[in-house]
Image (spheres, rainbow, N blue to C red):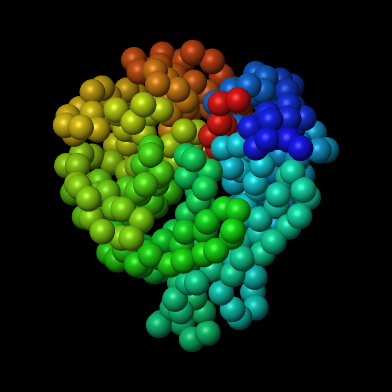
Amino acid sequence: MLTNLTAALALTAVLGAPPAGTELPGTDAKIVADLAGRPVQLSYYAGVVPDKRWAWDPAKKAFVETDGPLTVSPGERWEATLLRRPTPGPPSVRFADRRTGRESEVKLPVPEDPERAGSHLNTLWPTWSPDGRHLLVNVFEPGDEPRSEGIVLIDVPSLKARFVRIENALITVGGFQWTRDSKGVVVRWGRNGASAIRQYDLTGAVKRTWQVRGRPVGHGLGTFSPSGRRFVTACTSLEKAACVWDTRTGKAVTRIDIAFSPVWGPVLGWYDEQHLLAPVRDGFGVVDLKGKVVQTLVKVGKKQQIYPWFDARAKS
C-alpha cells in the first residue's frame, strides 16, 4: 500500500505539465518555457469569448474546455471548479480527485441576496490554502465597489463547507487571500485610494491590520513569500507596480514597475523567495525584486485578451 507521500510523488510524476511550445487554444498565446518542476502551474485561462474557458488536462496532455473557473491544489491531486447555473439554488463547486477519478459537487452555504429574490450573493475566486487542506470562495454583494459578506471554506478531503461571515471588506480583484501558514486570510479594507490590508483568522476574528497600499494578490504562491517574512501587493492604479512589504513591521521593502496591458488579466504573486510571477513585456513570467525579467513563461500578443490563472505547486 502506498503511503500518502509516496502516492503524492507518484501522482506528480505521471501528471506532467505543459511543455514549451504548447499553444493556448482560442488565443495567440504560447507557453515558451517548460513548466514541469516549477513552483507554479498554469491551471486555467479564459480568452476573448466570455463563455470559453480552458484548463490543463494532464491525462490528455492538452488544454480542454471547462465550464467554470478552475483551480488545482498545490499537491496537484484536486481540481476545483466553481459552477454557475441559470437555475435557482446556491452556487456549487465540483471537486475532481485526480488520483481516483471521482467527482463530487458541493453546494455552497451562501446567503440569499436580499435585493434579488431567489438569487444568492455573488461568489468568485476559488483559492487553495498553501497546505492544500481548504478551498476558499469569496462571497460578496453586487455593485461597482462591492463589499464582502464573508467566505466559504471547504475542507478537503471531507468536502464539508462552512460560511464565515466577514462583512464590509473592500472586494477588488482576487478578494480574500491566504496567509502563508494557512491559518488566516487577508483582504483589502477601507475604500479605493485609502485602504489597508486586514488579517482575519478562520473564525472571522480580526488579527491585525497593515497600513499599506494596494490589494493582496493570489497568483502563484500568493500574497506571502514562502518564508512568510514578506508580502506583496498590487499597489498602483492600473496595477503597473508591485510593492513588497515586511510582514512583521509592515514597512516597505521595495517597489518595482511591472508590465501592463489593458487586455490581459492581472497576474501577480510570489514565484519563490526572491522572485515574483508577474506580467512582462511580451506576456507573463518571472521577475526579480529589482524588476528585472528573469524568464518569460507564456508569450501573449499585445492585442490578445486573456485571463490566466497560475496556482502554486507543492515541492515534491
As drawn, is 306 to the left or to the right of 23?
Answer: left
Residue at image location 43% in from the left, 48% down from the top: 174
| Vertical comparison of 170 with 167: above or below | above
Residue at image location 24% in from the left, 33% down from the top: 247
As drawn, is 47 to the left or to the right of 268?
Answer: right
Residue at image location 54% in from the left, 68% down from the top: 108
As drawn, is 60 to the left or to the right of 116?
Answer: right
Could you say which is closer to the camera, residue 311 or residue 144? 311
| Vertical comparison of 80 with 232: above or below | below
Could you say which is closer to the camera, residue 44 or residue 17? 17
**Residue 81, x across and y down, in percent:** 63, 55
Q: From where the camera sits, is residue 252 visible?
A: yes
Viewport quadrant of the N terminus: top right
As drawn, is 62 to the left or to the right of 89?
Answer: right
| Vertical comparison of 32 with 68: above or below | above
- Number of marks present in the image shown: 0
**Residue 316, x across and y down, in percent:** 60, 25
